[in-house]
Amino acid sequence: MQRLKGETENSAVAWLELPDAFLAAPGATWPPDPLNRSTGMLCYIGWLAWASGYLGGITMGGNEDSLPVVRVGGAVDKEIPDLASLDNDIRLLSQEVESISIETVPLDRWDCVAMFAVGLLEVAADFCLGDPQAGLSKAMSDENSRLGHHFSRIHDELSHTAHPLDYQGPGFGGTDHRARTFAHDLFTLPLSIYMLAKGEFVDFRYVECAPQWIISRLNQNGMPYASMPPDQAALAAIIHMVADFFAAKSLPVPGFGILAHVPVRSIRKLVADMYAEGFNLRHVMVQGLGPLACEVALRVYHWIRLRGTPFSKEARKHKLNKMLLLTHGAATCVNLGKVIILQNPCLLNLPMIVRTLTLTYPVITEEMEIAHRAKTKAQMAVLRTKLQTLRTAVLLEDAICYAATADQILHSQDEEIRLLVEQTEANRQRGSARLRNTLEAWRVLNRSPEEEHQ
């Protein structure tokens, strides 16, 4: 018994065992000749199954013992599937292929027009609202303006004094003290609650490039801070943040309090300068009005265009994400170009950049998933074609087997048919002789006297 190993283009490996008698037979070749009656056809079917990696399922990798084996002649470990099982496999595979969705909604010219128009709106909003020293952000920070005065009054009315969050000792004082501590960073809100509950200020600053911890229960005037229960501390921290949001300098951008403590002085200076020039949480929220208007406009347009269409929910969502990504991405490129040309980092539109980044991942992931599903669907279609080819081969093998059986039956009955034909011929000849004798006798009996005289 000799074992042959084959590997398909999908790295599917199968083994085929051949009897020594077959390989030793005169003119035996591999692959076998399919016209060599039923034996050659059976070998051919085994070879086809071996080459396609199909017999009882495709085995990806694994060792020899785990691979499908077909023996031609003798005992069969795993038989070639019959037509019923092949038809069932083809039907299930067809259902699986049809269930894989690679549907997408293409972008048309009206989509491009809508994205261009909304993108222009977003860029225009960035130019109008992106500068913290002008426009709406300046009006909210200027206490002499009506809006700024209203905000200042809200800040003063909310009770948030005598808190350790406002410690202004050496290295932490001035109007920009909120950007120098962890206390006013929303990302470190738990630390702010801890300070209020303990009644002490906890932070550090750099002295000659070395961090120096500052833990104080007294404010810059020597007055002690009061401690409070954790629930009251949490409520007080929230009220404090809301009050400082309406202050002239507002709260720092979340994360700026952490950046103000990194060991790189240039980053600490950049954060301090941007906060001093008005780049704060309130200004970032004003900047977000442009991306927000873009989101609303594109979502309304997308809903109107695809209303009543047969596309799936996933395909619609993917198209919307692509449109939003292209629009926000183009506006972000314009914003980054403006920052580079004017060399003013305060013009950086954080909401626009963050929204672009959050859209990039789902769009790329969905594109990769669609490509993967398309590849899987193509591979399954190829496998279905191989199964159909194998089914055709099985049908052909059955036909050849039936023909060979009929031929054997005919050859085994040749002698009987010959004897039957000879007997029939002898009976015919004897019958013909008897018929001639009978006719002659009748002719003699029916002769007239004149015929007899003659």
Image: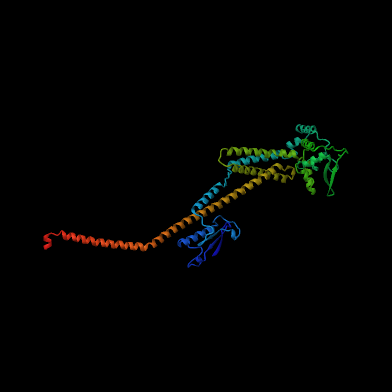
428 in relation to 237, above or below: below
Q: Residue at x 18, y 59 (%)?
A: 442
Q: State which quarter of the image contains the C terminus.
A: bottom left
326 in relation to 403, above or below: above
In front of the other: 36 or 151: 36
Left or right: 261 in relation to 319: right
What percent of the width, then of the height, locates residue 333? 68, 45
Residue 4 is drawn in which quadrant?
bottom right
Left or right: 115 in relation to 184: left
In front of the other: 353 or 393: 393
Residue 355 is drawn in which quadrant?
top right
Q: Residue at x 29, y 63 (%)?
A: 426
What percent of the width, then of the height, locates residue 39? 47, 62
How many numbered dots are placed on residues in this image?
A: 0
Residue 124 shows in the view: no
261 in relation to 7, above or below: above
In front of the other: 87 or 431: 431
What percent of the width, then of the height, locates residue 144? 78, 33
What percent of the width, then of the height, locates residue 64? 59, 60
195 in relation to 400, above or below: above
Residue 118 is drawn in which quadrant?
top right
Q: Residue at x 60, y 38 (%)?
A: 303
Left or right: 273 in relation to 310: right
